[in-house]
Amino acid sequence: MKVLVVGQGGREHTLVWKLAQSPVVEKVYCAPGNAGTAVDGENVNIAADDLGRLMSFAKHNDIGLTVVGPEVPLVAGIVDEFKSHGLKVFGPSKAAARLEGSKAFSKEIMKKAGVPTAASKSFTRLEEAHAYLDALDDVPIVVKADGLAAGKGVHVCKNCTEGKAAATQMLQDGLFGPAGQTIVIEECLEGQEASILAIVDGDTIIPLETSQDHKRAHDGDLGPNTGGMGAYSPAPLVTDDIMDDIIRRILVPTIHTMRVEGHPFSGVLYAGLMLTQHGPKVIEYNVRFGDPEAQAVLMRLKTDLTQILSLAASGRLAELEGLEWDERPAVCVVMASEGYPGSYPKGRAISGINEADQLSDTKVFHAGTMAKDMDVLTDGGRVLGVTAMGDSIADAKQAAYQAVERICWDGAWNRSDISDKA
Ligand code: AMP
Ligand code: GLY
C-alpha cells in the first residue's frame, strides 16, 4: 500500500518514519515534507492546505491511506473532501474538527458531556466581556481566541485588568483576525499539564501512552510560550487510577456526546489536561497528534501504526487487539533557531545529524529543515526533535542530550531540562 502524510513538521517526520516500518507499506509520500521525510519517505511539493492538489495526487498515485498531521487542513475539511471521492483518510470530519477549530464549540461539547474543565463563558461583544471581567474578583484569568491562532491565541492573565486588555486586543483591535471575533474567558487552572492522545474511529477509543510537553521557551518553564520545546513519555504523574478517571470522565463522554450531536469523532483526540487538586481537567482539545508529543510516544509504539490508523479510518478499531509498547521511556529534545518563538533566520547549515542518528535507540526527527545539494539547512523555528529511549527517564534524557551535543548550526539552542519534572 502507498501512504500519504500531509504536513511538514516533526510530527509528520515521525509519522512517515513509523508508517514506513509497516510490512504492508511499499512507499510513504509526504506533502510538502522536510529534509527528514525525504530520507524516510518521498516528498511531494504540495502545500498542506492545498486540498485540491492533495486530493488529485492521492487519486492519481493510488494512495491507500492518507494521514493528516496538522490542524489547518482538518479544520478546512480535508477529510470530508477525500471521503467524498472514495479516498481512505485518517482524521476527523470538518464538523468534528471544530473540537480544536472553535474553543467555544469545544466548551459547549464539554458542558453537554459533563467533562471536567475550567469554568468559562464565550463573548462576541467587548462591553459584555468587560462587564463580566469587572464583576469577577481580581483573580488570574485566561482569555482565548475562539479559532485557530497558530498556538498564540491563549493569554494567561495575572488579573482582570490584563484580561480586559486581552479581550480588547482580540475583539476590538482584530488581533488574530476572524479567529478572535469570538473569545472564551475562563478560570485559570493550577497544576501540572499532561497530554493524552487517543485513537478514535467514531466509537472505539484506544488511548496511547501518556506524555508531557514543555510549552515555555526556557528552563524552569520560564519565557514565552512556544509550540513545544520537548516531551517525554510516559508521564509518571498520570497514574493508572488517574488514567482510568480520564477515560471514564473525559474521553468516553466526549466521544459519546460528539456522536449523539451528529458529529462522530474519528482521528486523534488530544486532550490537553491540567492535573488539578480536584482531579484532571481539560484545558483544550486538539484533533491531531501533538508535536513534540508524537515523537516521544510513537518512538515507543511496537504495534504497526499503519494497521492502527487504517482500521480507525475504516471504523473498525474494535478489531485491534490492544497495543504493544516498548516499556522504556522516551525523551524528545527540540533544537530551535536563534530568535524562536519570535522571528528567526533560515538557511543555516546543520552538521552532525548522521552522527547523532547512529547512536543506539536514538532518532533525529526533522521539523523545520530543507535539503539543498548535499546539505541540510534550517527552515523553521523548531528545527529538530532529537529523541532517544533509555531504561529510565534519566537514561533516556542523557541519551537524547548526548545526541543533541553532536549536532550544531549557527544559533542553535535548546532547553536543558526536558523531562526533569518526571
Ligand atoms: P494552547 O495554546 O491552547 O495550547 O494553550 C497554551 C497554554 O496556556 C497551555 O498549555 C496552558 O499552559 C495555558 N492554559 C490554557 N488554558 C489555561 C487555563 N484555563 N488555566 C491555566 N493555564 C491555561
Ligand atoms: N505540543 C502541543 C501541540 O501539539 O499542540
Image: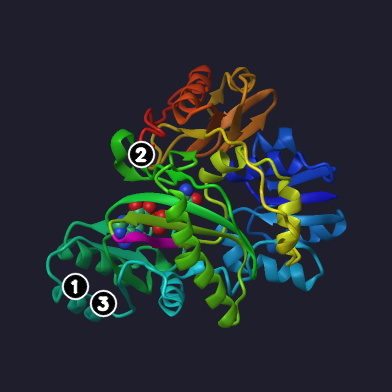
Q: Earlier in the sequence, mark 2 or mark 3?
A: 3
- Residue at (85% x, 50% y) in the render: 1
Image side of residue 107 versus residue 396, left or right: left
Mark 1 is surrounded, within 10 Å at the Cα level, by few (under 14), some (14 to 19) or many (20 or more) other residues, namely: many
Span shown in magenta: 278-284
Please tell me in which quadrant of the rendered image residue 16 appears: top right
Residue 166 on the magenta segment: no
Front one among 181 and 258: 258
Image side of residue 107 versus residue 137, left or right: right
Cα gap from disc 3 to disc 1, whole angstroms: 11 Å
Q: Which mark is residue 105?
A: none
Q: Is residue 48 visible?
A: yes
The residue that disc 3 covers is: 126
Q: Determine whether the residue tagged by mark 2 lies in a helix, strand or loop.
A: strand
Q: Amino acid at mark 1?
A: Leu
In the image, is residue 222 above or below residue 117?
Answer: above
Residue 338's spot in the image, x, y percent? 41, 31
Q: Is residue 57 visible?
A: no
Q: Determine whether the residue tagged by mark 1 lies in a helix, strand or loop.
A: helix
Mark 1 residue's CB less than 8 Å from ligand 1: no
Q: Amino acid at mark 3?
A: Leu
In the image, is residue 211 above or below residue 268?
Answer: above
Residue 418's spot in the image, x, y percent? 41, 33
- Residue at (62% x, 34% y) in the render: 370
